[in-house]
Amino acid sequence: MFSSIAIAPSILSADFMNLQHDIDVLRCGGARYVHVDVMDGHFVPNLTMGVPLVKQLKKTSGMPLDVHLMVDNPLRQIPWFIDAGADIVTVHAEALSEKGELDKAISLIVDMGAYPSVAIKPKTPVSVIENVIERLHMVLVMSVEPGFSGQSYIEGSEDKVAEVVAMACKAGVSPLIEVDGGIGVKTAPLVCARGADVLVAGNAVCAASDPASAIAEITAVAEQARTSALENS
């Protein structure tokens, strides 16, 4: 929370026929993480990448792997992805709604040597993470409904970022705050002015003619918005 802005390109928007090339371009262009969207076709209506790709990314990406599990059985799948090389594992609060499940998932991630993160959908109240925020490395605020790339940012998502910041401050902790969905030069300033640190950018970076320039531009406008917000607070 309020650390330097990091861009985490979503490789769901990359060219899978030239994925190593795209990863190299993103790394050299200043990306800090590789965001890996794992969808199971159940929790969300789409099916994407899995363990074999994460294993290959771990060998070749040269960046920490930010693995976002959009699956309906995260407690079963967490070990698969950590064994494959995930550095940060994000689970959805909505998939762990039974009593004690979210705590169990966080403990499993930590015990296996990865960093725990929890995602919340646009309609999910921030209160679902209140009892675990002290244990989290990162909170992922979804600014679109999960399941598809290329969606438009949901207006007002920045308010949820501010709610997470307030909750973290009250608890005396400072997790990273990541935002995923419709992030680009117009929306990055909105969320970073309210406290976001990590920006998941898909098409805005991967589909750009010059991904390095896109990363630099998004980072610059985000940092400027954050600086202005802090100066005016």
Image (spheres, rainbow, N blue to C red):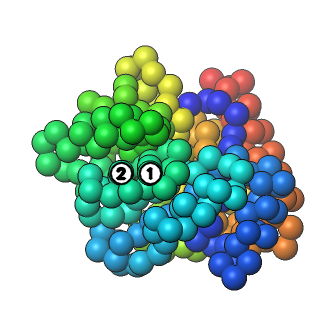
Looking at the rendered structure, the kind of residue marked 2 is: Pro
Query: Seen from this angle, which residue lies furthest bottom?
Result: 17
Work out how far the residue at label 2 is from the one at label 1, CA to CA, in angstroms: 6 Å
- Determine the secondary structure under disc 1: helix
Q: Residues within 10 Å of mark 1 (few under 14, many from 20)?
A: some
Instruction: Please state the horizontal and vertical placement of residue 62, each as a whole percent of the image.
Output: 71, 51
Query: Can the viewer see residue 127 in this picture?
Result: no
List x then y, in percent, for residue 46: 40, 78
Q: Quadrant of residue 36?
A: bottom right
Which of the numbered marks, if any, corresponds to residue 171? none
State the residue in front, 76 or 145: 76
Compared across the picture, whether 217 is left or right of 47 comes to right
Amino acid type indicated by mark 1 = Asp
Q: Is residue 50 visible?
A: yes
Pointer 2 with pointer 1, Cβ within 8 A: yes
Q: Residue at x 46, y 68 (%)?
A: 50
Asked which quadrant contains residue 109, the reply is top left
The residue at the point 29 percent across, 74 percent down is 42
Examine the rendered structure and indicate whether residue 46 appears above or below residue 56. below
- Circle 1 residue: 83
Give the structural element (helix, strand or loop) at label 2. helix
Residue at the disc numbered 2: 79
Q: Residue at x 83, y 55 (%)?
A: 29
Residue for point 84% across, 59% down: 212
Up the image or down, 211 lies above or below 216; here it is below
On screen, residue 176 above or below 35: above
